[in-house]
Amino acid sequence: MIRESTTNLNITTELSIAGIQKQFGSFTALRDISLNVQKGEFVCLLGPSGCGKTTLLRIIAGLETADSGTIVQTGCDITKASAAERDYGIVFQSYALFPNLSVAQNIAYGLKGRAQDKARRVTELLTLIGLPAIADKYPAQLSGGQQQRVALARALATSPNLLLLDEPLSALDAQVREHLRTEIKALQQKLGVTTIMVTHDQEEALTMADRIVVMNHGVIEQIGTPTEIYQHPASRFVADFVGHCNWLTAHAVSEHRVRLGESELEISHSTRLKPGHECELFIRPEDIQLLPNWRAGEQLALGKLLHMELIGCVYRLRLSVALWAGVELEVVISHRELAQLRLGDGQLIPVYLPPDKLRCFMPERAA
Ligand SMILES: Nc1ncnc2c1ncn2[C@@H]1O[C@H](COP(=O)(O)OP(=O)(O)OP(=O)(O)O)[C@@H](O)[C@H]1O
């Protein structure tokens, strides 16, 4: 269970969620969820399908009720407030624009006041989303990306203090998605609007969020900045879900040393293990170093190249290392590194595991 400290709850806190629980019949969708979101922060709820992220977003929006727990927005308890009474704008996965209304009418839908004020606000928002000339178009005349930008403008029309995004990019093709995520992030920063976005796409979360909340089976596994989540995953689940990794079964020799096959390896972080305990060593593919020449020293062994493939701007290699109990490693290297190594199939190549990049987890069954 992860519970955020409430001592840092102060005027910069936009949203404070405490002890949220949600059952659907006998199924527990959310278990004791606690989270503080600061004003202006961009928080991503990240996790696999069915982990409860949409249910949590819907509870924040008042579209679903929690069985227990509280939600406080800028000091006001809104746990029991209806969706209409809450202060937020929302964008869903499907464009959800009214097809029979023009773009201008869609954006102005929630606005109150005089017609000319509404028209001015619509123009302002269309400029903000970079589509000043589409006011009279209808949703069917727009691309998916344009429709999502209009949905964003509609969600921002009333200047809400909280923006909720439910997988807003997942229906779009890869190129548009990448472009739009940069735009949404830039807009969010420009407006300073506190934002909570649901996504199952780790790349989206890593590139857009100030903090990521990783969820699994209705609980929060870890809350942290993208760098913390990627470099210091708190659990095996987080390590596996965010990015690629290698797992090597080893045995503790002391707090900072483990035995892997014929070798002993040093680990900078404390393993918190007693001698003889089995552990799972974790290292990211890009943190493994391949050396052009053999040199004597610790953390080194010869790896045999099994396979190599180009994946965009980098190469992914598979190597087996006899000295380390025949373990197979995935390694990612740049074009420049590859050119220096001059590799061929079956070639032996020195592999180095930096002590500060190795982390140690208890095996799942023993944890
Ligand atoms: N109204 C409901 N009645 C019964 N079960 C529900 C209901 N809404 C959600 N669930 C269940 O609760 C769990 C969490 O659902 P939720 O939609 O929050 O997951 P999610 O992480 O957003 O997944 P996805 O990315 O697939 O939408 C799922 O197992 C889902 O089947």
Image: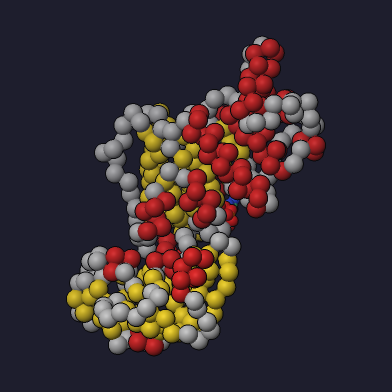
Q: For this rendering, which residue is in front, 196 or 246?
A: 246
Image label count? 0
The quadrant where residue 63 appears = top right
Residue 222's quadrant in the figure? Answer: bottom left
* Residue 154 in sight: no
- Residue at screen point 27% across, 81% down: 296
Up-down relation of residue 283 to residue 215 (above or below): below
Q: Nearer the viewer, residue 55 or 149?
A: 149
Figure check: 82 above or below 177? above
| Relative image position of residue 348 (x, y in whole percent) | 43, 85
On the question of residue 337 being in view, the answer is yes
Camera-side residue of 184 and 78? 184
Q: Quadrant of the N terminus?
A: bottom left
**Residue drawn 55% across the image and 76% down it:** 308
Ligand 1 located in image quadrant: bottom right
Identify which residue is drawn at 58% across, 66% down: 311
Query: Residue 162, percent across and down?
Result: 50, 33
Residue shown at 69% from the left, 17% from the top: 119
Instruction: Report the colour scheme.
Output: secondary structure
344 to the left or right of 230: right
Quadrant, the C terminus: bottom left
Indicate left or right for 366 with 177 as reference. Answer: left
Q: Nearer the viewer, residue 235 or 56?
A: 235
Q: Is residue 129 left or right of residue 142?
A: left
Q: Position of residue 24 (x, y in %)?
A: 53, 54
